Image: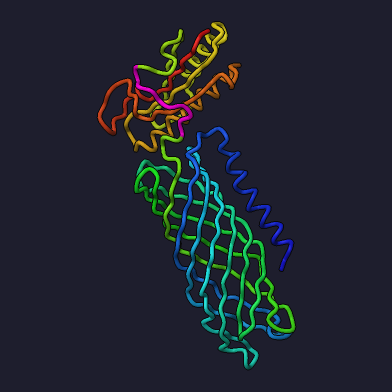
Amino acid sequence: MTMRGILLGTALAVAVPSVALSTAAFAAPEGFYVGAGAGVNWTEDADLSSYPAPGLGLKEEFKIGGIGDISVGYATAMGLRAELEAAWRWRNGVDGTSSATPGLNGLGGKTSSYAFMGNLLYDFDIGLPITPYIGAGAGIAGVKKTLNGASDRDWVFAYQGIVGASYAINDTVALTLDYRYFATVDPEFELGPVTSKSEYRNHTILAGLRYSFGGPSRVTPVAAPAPAAPPMAAQPQSEYQVFFDWDKATITPNSASIIADAAEASSRARAVRIQVIGHTDTSGSPTYNQRLSVRRAEAVRQGLVARGTPATMISIEGVGENQLMVPTGPNVREPSNRRAQILIKIS
């Protein structure tokens, strides 16, 4: 067992999700999810050194094997996902061995592995039910080799690259399909009187299901009331409207001026609470618009804080395309609906 590999892999498996969560600290969370998948894997040909004695060696070729995995993760409205994954790659039987040493050709055996990985992924929301994603992971793997009747397992540092796409069946269930390149540092095996070093590199096609405990409605920290009766309607308040360009959550110079006016007014009037509500028009999917509305509300919140408004005084929510200032049909780019409301409750 390679202890250094175990310690390094475990540290990275814990660190990768932590980095993802801190990166999206200002994003409204989509929530936790679980996933499971199955597929096939191809293990690349591997050189096995010092087998069965120093100075000897052979090359192994492998058959196609299977893979099964389970995962649990956390998704954010900004598209980042951090997850922990357990995977089992099995049944990579030795298809043949070749060596310059007589008697080492045609040996039988198999290779398999258990892996525990921390993955960081990014979803490209393109406004369609299909969402491409890319990712990378690091962790530990227990690689087991059986050859000519002898077997051994070594735990080593592992890493992988991921590219794939998901298809949203509904707001909580998605089908996934991805390719993964999985590899480890060279494991060592005791398959005889000496220790032999090998290689482990793998290509995987994985299909699965992902179930989210969040969904679009989970990104709103405060439940959205009916348009005519916002939560602070019964209290003295002031209201400001901040408008955005299409498909953007970027503060324009004109919007920055409005935010500055709102920050000054809240300070002058001794505001006790400020609520920022993000909105979108109907172009794009409802799921995408929900996320965009939260990003707009968050951008305004950061603008207020930058101008001296206490962050503890501000709450945000996104209502997507559900509270239109100008009623329209679906897939309509309406500038008046691309906005964020600043509602100031005055003492």
Residue 303, quarter of the rendered image: top right
- Using residue 316 as the reference point, say whether residue 100 is left or right of it: right
Q: Position of residue 88 (x, y in %)?
A: 54, 65
The foreground one among 114 and 27 is 114
Colour treatment of the image: rainbow
Q: Position of residue 52 (x, y in %)?
A: 69, 85
The foreground one among 272 and 324 is 272
Q: Is residue 226 magenta?
A: yes
For the point 41% across and 21% down, the residue is 243
Q: Residue furthest left?
A: 329
- Using residue 138 as the reference point, say whether residue 278 is left or right of it: left
Q: Main secondary structure of the magenta part?
A: loop
Q: Is residue 214 magenta?
A: no
Q: Position of residue 239 (x, y in %)?
A: 44, 12
- Using residue 328 as the reference point, say whether residue 105 is left or right of it: right
Q: Which residues are magenta?
A: 219-228
Compared with 47, 129 (above or below) is: above
Compared with 344, 74 (above or below) is: below
For the point 45% across and 35% down, the residue is 218
Q: How many marks?
A: 0
The quadrant the N terminus occupies is bottom right
Compared with 263, 181 (above or below) is: below
For the point 32% across and 33% down, the residue is 283
The foreground one among 173 and 9 is 173
Residue 285, quarter of the rendered image: top left
